[in-house]
Image (spheres, rainbow, N blue to C red):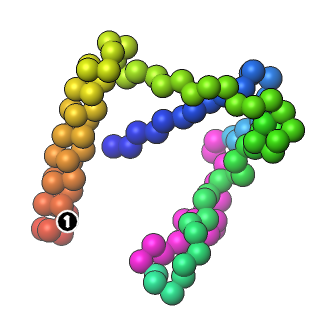
Amino acid sequence: MTCFNFNITGDGTATPKGAKFPGAYAADEPGFHFDIYDDKSKAPYPAVGPPLFKSSAVAGRGSAPKSRVVLSPTGQGPAADAAYYKMQNAAIARQAAIDEALDAIGG
């Protein structure tokens, strides 16, 4: 289970090139063959897929990004969000324990 938080800013006029699926990735991209356990290579992980979109604001040519907006997963306030995150963390911990048990028996 993975969760991503995005901070999307701007006025909505950017038109990034985008990527088409299937076809956004190639099987021979270095990121698919990167060995995270190779101590000899301290190179950063080479991300797969098309390059990230860089807005003009990031490059310093446009308006500054707008203030940060935090989206609530529950819509019921900080206490409900904290309970939700606690529940999600417990679910992740349970899944990790299951994965470890399966790995231990060769599964």
Q: Name above or below for residue 85 compared with residue 78.
A: below
Residue located at (26% from left, 20% from top)? 79
Residue located at (22% from left, 34% from top)? 86
23 sits left or right of 54 in the view = left
For the residue pair 52 and 61, the one nearer the viewer reads as: 61
Q: Name above or below for residue 32 compared with residue 56.
A: below
Q: Residue furthest top?
A: 76
Residue located at (48% from left, 36% from top)? 5
Residue located at (26% from left, 19% from top)? 80
Residue 54 x/y as whole percent: 75, 43
Identify the element where label 1 is drawn. Answer: helix
For the residue pair 53 and 26, the one nearer the viewer reads as: 53
Residue 4 x/y as whole percent: 46, 39
Residue 12 x/y as whole percent: 74, 21
Q: Which contiguous range is marked in magenta? A: 21-37
Q: Which residue is mark 1?
A: 103
The kind of secondary structure the magenta stretch mainly shows is loop
Residue 34 x/y as whole percent: 53, 72
Q: Residue furthest bottom?
A: 40
Tell me the quadrant of the picture where the C terminus can be found: bottom left
For the residue pair 35 and 62, the one nearer the viewer reads as: 62
- Examine the rendering and report whether any part of residue 23 can be seen: no
Residue type, label 1: Asp
